[in-house]
Image (tube, rainbow, N blue to C red):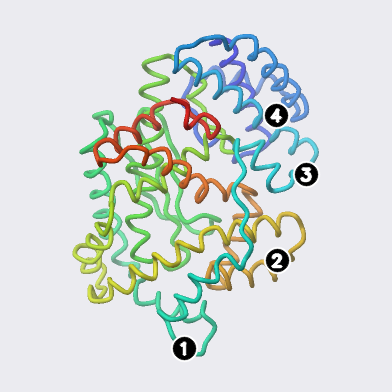
Amino acid sequence: MDELAERYVKLVLALGEHDSGYVDAYYGPDSWVTDAKKMNLSAQQIAGQAKQLHQQLAALVDNDEEMEKLRGHYLDRQLVALQAHANAIASGKRAAFDSQSQSLYDTVAPTHAFEHFAQPLAELEALLPGDAPLNQRVETFLMQFYIPREKQDAVFARAIEECRSRTKAHIQLPMHENFTLEYVQDKPWSGYNWYQGNAQSLIQLNVELPIEISRAVDLGCHEGYPGHHTYNALLENNLVNEKGWLEFSVYPLYSPQSLIAEGSANYGIELAFPGEQKEQFERDVLFPLAGIDPQLAEQYAEFNRLKAELSYASNEVARQYLAGTLLTEKAIELLQTYSLYSPEKAAQRIRFFDTYGAYVINYNWGKDLVKDYVEQAKSEDERWQRFARLLASPRVPSSIFWN
């Protein structure tokens, strides 16, 4: 199994030579990077070798021990995704949205007609009355909650500190874990964690568009604690360092691992700030830091609750846009109508679809799967234990509910 895992890692690194965004993190042996480059494989050859490895793996997976079974299934699904992405690069064509979701992320998100979002939209109409289109009223409303550029450092530092403190109260992280925070622009995403290995991360925040105050906690949890930084540090410590499973020293972005990563990062916000605790922390701590009137917090929290019910609308726009049944202008219009984006945010979202395809399901459908798994436990302590177990084990969507 270890030999097969090494070959898998080198194939992932080799495919990274064809797609610069594919290898999200790598902290394995430097010699393997050299070996992967020397292989000089085409994307088609990588797909063929991934298929062979997948066939060989089937003969190796014969172990009743839970972690070994999870390891074998993880490699099985990751190899399917590796082969699918290599084939897409070789052909220059992406699969249809749901086919892409299944092959790359080991699951298919539910489909919702746009009528599904009528109720939260009606409630938002009532919350923000006026004659202008709703997305314009939303933009005017949100202007009250943008963090002034000169106060972003203080607000994000305090939010991340709180996310870290709440996470460390329940999850043991390496003593030396840390991150560097960097502000960037001209990216198709709002935030990104680049894991460096040795429990270190580079967290980048995209500040080209105004940032709402609620994004401080969201990004602090999602990119840091108990999100991506925590997830990667636990995988490295528990599976690479302790078990020597070097397949976890590489993170291919377009793979089932991403659904667990993004889903746990989004659910981690609710886990760290259950009930009304996020609203209270923002009102009492972050609003004053940003110079925002705390008396607006209640209405803002209700707005965010309703807007969260529109999450899957973005998936539907992406599904149709990537199928070619929506032109860019119509997709932007639908994002403004059903996701209530500003024109600038809608255009940025289209850039995300163009870059990452069906990856969008990992945020909402991934969160729902992780939430269903974790909340089988009833108490807060048990939920944290179950969450930590998920982050420190080789689970993918089709094995998340294995006992």
Relative to 346, does residue 159 appear above or below in the rendering?
Answer: above
For residue 328, the mark is 2
Name the amino acid type tagged 4. Answer: Gln
Q: Give the residue pinned by disc 3.
A: 93
Q: Earlier in the sequence, mark 1 or mark 2?
A: 1
Q: Nearer the viewer, residue 396 or 194?
A: 396
Residue at horizontal 74 percent and vertical 44 percent from the top: 94
Estimate the spatial distance between the alpha carbons at disc 2 and disc 3, rounded to whole Å.
18 Å
* Mark 1 neighbour density, 10 Å: few (under 14) some (14–19) many (20 or more): few
Q: Is residue 81 left or right of residue 134?
A: right
Q: CA distance from mark 3 to mark 4?
A: 14 Å
Q: Marks 1 and 2, Cα distance to the nearest angstrom?
A: 28 Å
Foreground: disc 1 or disc 4: 1
Dot 4: element: helix
Q: Position of residue 376 (x, y in %)?
A: 37, 38
For image coordinates 53% across by 45% down, the residue present is 362
Circles 3 and 4: CB atoms closer than 8 Å: no
x and y percentages locating residue 152 in the rendered image? 32, 62
Q: How many C-alpha atoms fall within 10 Å of the one at disc 3: few (<14), some, or many (≥20)?
A: few
Q: Does residue 362 sit above or below 112 in this rendering?
A: above
Q: Amino acid at mark 1?
A: Gly
User: Which quadrant would residue 194 be assigned to in this image?
Assistant: top left
The amino acid beneath tag 2 is Thr
Q: Residues within 10 Å of mark 2 (few under 14, many from 20)?
A: some
Label 1: element kind: loop
The answer to whether mark 1 and mark 4 are in CB contact below 8 A is no
Say the numbered circle drawn on residue 333. none
Residue bearing the label numbered 1: 130
Mark earlier in primary sequence (3, 4): 4
Please report the residue visible at 43 percent of the width from the left and 14 percent of the height from the top: 244
Q: Which residue is mark 4?
A: 83
